[in-house]
Amino acid sequence: MTTFVDRVELHVSAGNGGHGCASVHREKFKPLGGPDGGSGGRGGDVTLVVDPQVTTLIDYHHSPHRSATNGKPGAGDHRTGGEGHDLVLPVPDGTVVMDKRGNVLADLVGNGTSFVVAAGGRGGLGNAALASARRKAPGFALLGEPGDSMDIVLELKSVADVALVGYPSAGKSSLISVLSAAKPKIADYPFTTLVPNLGVVTAGDNVYTIADVPGLIPGASQGKGLGLEFLRHVERCEVLVHVLDCATLETDRDPLADLDTIEAELAQYGGLDDRPRLVALNKIDVPDGQDLADLTRASLEERGYEVFEVSAVSRKGLRELSFALARIVAAARAARPVQEATRVVLRPVAVDDAGFTVTYDAAEDLYRIVGSKPERWIKQTDFSNDEAVGYLADRLARLGAEVALAKAGAKEGDTVVIGESDNAVVFDWEPSMAAGAEMLGRRGEDHRMESPRDAVTRKREREAIRDDAASEFARFDPLPRREVEPAPEEYEIDDEEI
C-alpha cells in the first residue's frame, strides 16, 4: 500500500453563491408593503494551509475531488441566506501549487502559510437591495455567482538542510539512521529506498534536518530509475553530500566515476550549481574499502571537495561529518535576510473596474464583449424574467457597451456575444433600445423585450382597449337605462274643421 505521495492532481470546487429572493411584503392594512427579498449567502472558499502534522499528500491521492459548500438563498422579510462553509485542506510544509500547465501559483513554506486556491461565488442581491427611486418594486432578483472550479497539481519538496545523494546501495539510508533517529528501510539490494527519508541531527548547539533521496543512476534526469521523481526534494537543501561507495561489487564502478555521473545528472536537472558539496567515502570498515578511500581522497581534494571517511557500522568519521554539516548550515542561515514578524495586512482584491473590450470576430461574423463586469452580470441574470433582462440592458448601457459597439462598427441586427465561448450569451443588437426604469411595465415584464409592431397593429390594439373599456363601463353603470317612447307626431289643424 502506498504510504508516501509527493505529487497529486487535485480537483477543487468552491461553493456557489445563493440566489437572491424576489418578494413583496404582505401584511394586513399594508397593501403597499414594498419589496422585502433578502440577498443570497456567499459560497465557501477552498484554502490550502501548511500543517506541520501532515507529511504526505496521500489523503488527496485517494480523494482527489474536494468541494466547499454553497451559500443559501435569500428569503422574504429581508432575510439573508447563510454563507457556505470554507473548506481548509492541510498540506505538508514545502508544497508547491501549480496549474495543469505547470505554472506555479503558490509556494507554501512555513507553518500556517495559506493560499485561497478557489474563491466562493458571491450571493445574488434580493429585490429589496435592487429597489430604487425609479424601480420601486422590482419583480426580479439576481442569481448567485458560481464558485471557482479548477484542477491543480500539488508537489511536495522536502524542506531539509542537507541532502544525501549517490548511487543505489551507497549506504545513504545507513548514514541517516545513525546520524539521526530516522528508521529507514535498509537492505543489501539496490533501490531499497523508495521514498525520501527525513531525520533531525543535533551537532553541538546546532540542529538541522537531513534528507535521504532515493539512489540516482545514469539518465535519472531524463526519468530513469527513481531519480527524476525525487530530485525535487533536494532543491531546498543548503548543502549536498555525495555518498560514495568504497566497497562496491561492480567492477566497472569506482568512487570518482560515481561522482562524475551524479554531478552530470544534477547539472542536467538544473538549479543546484550554487549548493556547497561535501564527499563522504562510505563503508571504509569493509575489507579493501579503506584502501580505495586512501587512493581516491587525494584526487577528490584536488577537485576542491572536503572529504570525510565514514562508516555507518563502526561510526567512524560521523562526528566530524555532522559538525562540518552544522557549520555550513549555520553559515547559510546567517546569510539569510532577517525575517521580521509577519503582520496581518488585509488587502481586498479589487474588482477590475477598468471596463471591457469589444472585438470583431471576422471568422464567425460577430462582436464579442469581454470584461469582468459584463461577464459577471451575465451570470447574475435570470433570463426567464423579462424585467431582469431589462435590468441587464440598463447596466450594459450605463457601462457604455452600446457606444463601444457603435465605435467598433456594429450595426442594428449584428450578433453580439458576451463572455467566453463556454458560457457566452448571444443576442442581436438593437441600438435603439432605450434604458431607464421608468419604461418598465408590470412587474416581471419589460416591453423593450417585445418585438416591434407596425402602425396598423398598434391602432387595432388601441381600438380594442377602448371597446373593452366601454363595455366595462356599461356593465357597471349604476343607473339602468329605460326605454323612452318616441314623442307623438304633431298633427296639422285644418281651419275648415274649426
Image (spheres, grey):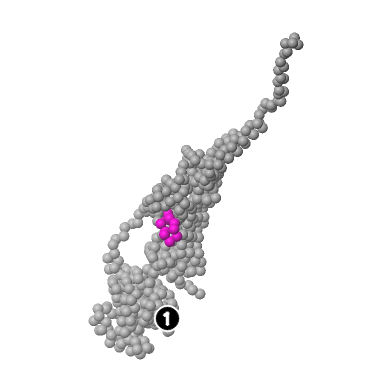
Residue 321: percent from left, percent from top: 31, 76
Q: Is residue 260 visible?
A: yes
Report the residue at 58% width, 36% height from top: 31
Dot 1, how many residues are within 10 Å of its Cα: few (below 14), some (14-19), or many (20+)? some
Quarter assignment of residue 95 = bottom left
Judged from this view, the residue extending furthest toward the right is: 497
Residue 493 lies in the magenta-colored region: no
Quarter assignment of residue 342 = bottom left
Region rendered in magenta: 360-373
Residue 361 lies in the magenta-colored region: yes
- Residue type at tag 1: Phe
Residue 486: percent from left, percent from top: 71, 23
User: As rendered, which of 143 and 497 lies closer to the eye?
Assistant: 497
Judged from this view, the residue extending furthest toward the left is: 302
Report the residue at 52% width, 51% height from top: 383
Q: Is residue 32 above or below residue 361?
A: above
Residue 411: percent from left, percent from top: 43, 51
The residue that label 1 is drawn on is 191
Report the residue at 39% width, 81% height from top: 168
Secondary element at image label 1 = loop
Judged from this view, the residue extending furthest toward the top is: 498
